[in-house]
Amino acid sequence: MSTHDSNRPPLIDRILAPVRRLEPRMPQTRGRAIWQFIGLTLVAAVLSSLFVLPGFLGTGVAAAAGISDFNALPANLQIQQFAQNSTVYAKQGGQDVPIATFYAQNRQDVTWDAVSQNVKDAVVAAEDPRFYSEGAVDVLGTVRGALATVVGGDVQGGSSITQQYVKNVEVEKCEALTDAKKVQACYDDAAGQTLQRKVQEMRYAVGLEKKYSKKDILMGYLNVVGFGGQVYGIEAAAHYYFNVDANALSLAQAATLVAIVNNPANLRIDEPDSKTNGAANGYALTKARRDYVLDRMYVNHKITAADRDAAKKTPVQPTVTPTTSGCAAAQQYNAAFFCDYVRDVILNDPAYGKTADDRWATLNRGGLKIYTTLNLDLQAVAQQSLSTYIPATKAGIDLGASNVSVELGTGRIVTMVQNRAFNNTDQPVDGTTAVNYNTDEAYGGSSGFQTGSTFKAFDLAAWLEAGHSLYEYINASQHTFPMSDFTSTCGDISGPSWQVSNDEGSASRLSVMAATAESVNTAFAQMATKTDLCSILNAAKSLGIHTAATGGTLNSYPSMILGTNEVAPLTMATAYAGIADGGTVCTPVAIDKVINADGSAHAVSPTTCTQGLDKDIAAGVTYALEGVMTDGTATSANPWDGTPIMGKTGTTDDSLQNWLITSTTKVAQATWVGNVSGSTPLRSLSFDGIGGGNVKFSIVKPIQKALDQLYGGDDFTKPTNSSLYGSKVTVPDVTGKTPDQAQKLLEALGLDVTVDQTPVDSTQTAGTVASTDPPAGSAIEGGGSVTIQLSSGQAAPSATPTPGGGSTGKPTSTPGTGAGNAGGNGIGGGNGNGGLTGGGGAGG
């Protein structure tokens, strides 16, 4: 062997040297055959010189000429863990349910008691009848196999079960490699038909029998040996070919599986259309070998003649039951996309290996039991609700929809569904996809979708951080916003003016609370002129917001405040969970625990929780978003079950993407419906009788109700008065100032200023400020409105007394009874009832 040549004892080399040039190959002439026979006889002589009967190496006395050098060969075979199936579990009815399996080789190691005695007897009788009585090496079998080569032309086995176990262990090491050249070199070294390899195999066999019992070696062999294709080990073979456990195999079934071991490529019974060994001829080749196994069992007194004959009469009838590798099997639980996400989590996480190849091997060969966060009961509700309204395909639109839910404080993902079925093959089918709409590109997802007004939650956070309040009033009548209106410490802002239209609500002047509830775009654009755009972006980032596209960056253009960045639903749900949890955002996790094949715990990367927002800021944002669910655009999705809830709708331009994200104090969910590609307005479509712009509400309501029933929810933290109302501002006296001077002074205090162009009577210079409304000295909320009144430059006319009546009394037909506007007492008149002529009254 290439890895051992440098350590080979010189005497062994000298012994083998004369026969190396006679390595067996197909003889072309009678003379060549004779020379091969002589060579193989020499091989037998060499072997006999090394070992003497009756112990055949295991218990005998070694030949003095070669035993010391033979013993110097490497003896400790390193038996690493055979490739094992890894299984993914999810919760259903509180129980762990397997939803998918990953494997490079379909194998499940079992113990001695988990295998039928029929199998143990059959493999010993057919492969190595002297297994329990001989040593590690079957010298007679080896010599017989060598001599048989002369007849058949191929190198024959003739190995003991221990030797076969050694060979399989060595080959298994090759299976774990990933470099093609290294794999081939390993196979040549481990399975090549050379004298050197055969002697080393024997040496390993001797070492094994000194360390392990016959029982352990036989079980090791039954767990490692191949049964055709990717089926390895007796347990996987029993399930695959007969759909039973290995301990339930009948005599005929056991003999059939042992028959397959002799030549798995030709004797496998999962190819019914095979002309040489298929269903039409009763799997003739396999049956012949099976009957041979039964005969050997009878000869070795493991079964009776009656048992043998009855088993021979049993036809070979497989019940092939494939164990699907990968996530396709999870489709029956509507969990294939979640499963694929779990797979990508493992393949991206250094906890499962330093390199990508290491992580692949851990998943596909490590025999892990992966217990995930998914709740299949909630998953079923989410899938049913989504599928009720959103089909897998719809004419005229590349339609997508998804839902994902995460727990607050833990980041555990409890639902993950979408409208299309999972298909990661190279044969796409309508209504299927390999793209997970809920996740980032790096985890099998898309490049994300524009979030629309759901992004306004981060606008609110920056608004409150800047010292503004929720009941501050905003002028929402402006629709054209020059770039000069905005400030960004992240970089320069330039370009044409931004035209803003309202989609879900509109008003000329309203509070931030009302603007949030009705999702008034112009109000939020106005709010953005009063804050730093960079602070909005940073608020989003602090809650974990990032682009779904690998390597992408969030844009900071003014339009981003209305949700133009493309983000994955899982990311949005995670951010809203952070807002609802007092600003503490926890990274999403899909795995609760992992158990290794040996029963030990495997390291699992936990969620990472950080304080993304100040608690008071988070409470203010949550309070505003509660209004969306109770008095705003999303009331129809509120289950009204007593569980406090907050949320936000989102609709992009032309209703291409539609969102609804909600959260209680326990769990958050994000639902998206929209164009995967293309630009078909959702509002132009109908889904089960519901308009495309509103279908998100019908989808979310049953999901939210199910979440509330399981998790419940508490009252959210109350916001501070400063978040609600801000600080009181005293209106300064600006009379006599120019309108521009007064406006700048008032706006510097955070007040919203309007100039009334209609002059009023005033002694102030014409065109200057006559007064304000509210008047100077008034205490109003920060951001409150103030109207500037301009002076006409003329004082109001003073009142002029009139004899016998009020100064401006209204004339009547009765002298002395005109009602005085100013209540004046005319001469000779009564109390304030002046007349045109001043008559009436008592006089005096």
Image: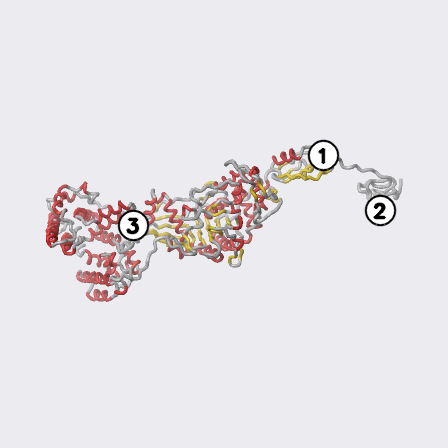
x, y (%) of residue 473? 61, 42
Q: Hey, what amino acid is under mark 1? A: Ala
Secondary structure category for the residue under label 2: loop
Secondary structure category for the residue under label 3: loop
> Please, is residue 309 above or below residue 359 in the view?
below
Q: Hey, what amino acid is under mark 3? A: Ala
**Nearer the observer, 398 or 391:** 398
Q: Hey, what amino acid is under mark 2? A: Thr
Going from the N terminus, do you reach mark 3 or mark 2 first? 3
Going from the N terminus, do you reach mark 1 or mark 2 first? 1
For the C terminus, give its image quadrant: top right
Q: Residues within 10 Å of mark 2 (few under 14, many from 20)?
A: few
In this view of the protein, can residue 646 be seen by the observer? Answer: no
x, y (%) of residue 653? 53, 48
Which residue bears the numbered disc 1? 766
Give the distance between the C-alpha atoms of the residues marked 1 and 2, in whole angstroms. 38 Å
Residue at image coords 35%, 50%: 369
Which residue bears the numbered disc 2? 812
Which residue bears the numbered disc 3? 83
Q: Residues within 10 Å of mark 3 (few under 14, many from 20)?
A: many
For the N terminus, give its image quadrant: top left
x, y (%) of residue 45? 10, 49
Q: Name the image quarter holding residue 419.
A: bottom left
Give the distance between the C-alpha atoms of the residues marked 3 and 2, in whole angstroms. 113 Å
